[in-house]
Amino acid sequence: MSDMAADAFLRMKRVELLIAILDGFSDQFSCRPVLSQIYSSYGAYIAYQLNKTLNPKLRQIWKTRDWNRKVRVFAKFFESFKQGNLLFNDSKALSIGARVGQEVAALKWVRVSDSVGIDLVPHPPFVVKGDFHTQPFEKETFDFEFSNVFDHALYPWKFVGEIERTLRPVGFVFYSWRYRYGRINILRMICLA
Ligand SMILES: C[S@@+](CC[C@H](N)C(=O)[O-])C[C@H]1O[C@@H](n2cnc3c(N)ncnc32)[C@H](O)[C@@H]1O
């Protein structure tokens, strides 16, 4: 976004732009819906998430066989954001629910070098430990946040609230989640004055 456009937005109290993105990219993701799950407690929810994320065989596959394919897919996606002037080399970017960090590697691949991921399980150097309901970052830290795990939130309002807290006054967030009949992708631009 140009400085002039950013200034114009900042003169307003709050502007939001929502764009539903319906391209063929969504079938490249493979997240399983969990909002429909009923958890007896926060602990039960965390245990459920960790069960898959810590699976040693799967982790090995994510880090080897899956790695190049997913980095390429994510890189193509982030490159399209750069071409749309939504993401820049000097953007500070966060990937939420990044697992072993393929999204972060892809961001770095497209030269958005100040990028990091969070997940319940850390995976250095790409992913730090954190629960996306209480992100471990200061307010107004990121220009861009990517999440294809909205359907994994136990408290969706906290998930969104934390993104709003940690985004800079003019920031972009990409949400994607799977529901019963497919996947919804939303690009949201938030401008807070
Ligand atoms: C289906 S995977 C998606 C991984 C990655 N984004 C991808 O597309 O390859 C969901 C990830 O969200 C993480 N996750 C689930 N609940 C979380 C929470 N409360 N805070 C942070 N990460 C969470 C899981 O550990 C898991 O790595």
Image (cartoon, rainbow, N blue to C red):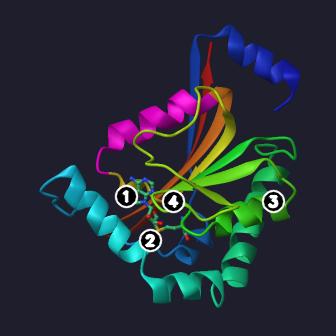
In the picture of the structure, the residue carrying the numbered disc 1 is 151
> SS for tag 4?
loop
Between 19 and 192, the one lying in front of the other is 192
Between 146 and 3, the one lying in front of the other is 146
For marks 3 and 1, give the one nearer the viewer.
3
Q: Which mark is residue 31?
A: 2
In the picture of the structure, the residue carrying the numbered disc 3 is 108
Amino acid on which the number 1 mark rests in the picture? Asp
> SS for tag 2?
loop
Give the residue drawn at x 81%, y 59%: 108
Residue 164 belongs to magenta span: yes
In the picture of the structure, the residue carrying the numbered disc 4 is 148
Provide the residue span drawn in magenta: 154-167
Name the quarter where the C terminus is drawn: top right
Give the residue drawn at x 60%, y 43%: 173
Q: Is mark 4 within 8 Å of ligand 1?
A: yes
Q: Which of disc 2 and disc 3 is earlier in sequence?
A: 2
**Do the residues bearing badges 1 and 2 touch, measured as CB atoms within 8 Å?**
yes
Q: Position of residue 149 (x, y in %)?
A: 45, 59
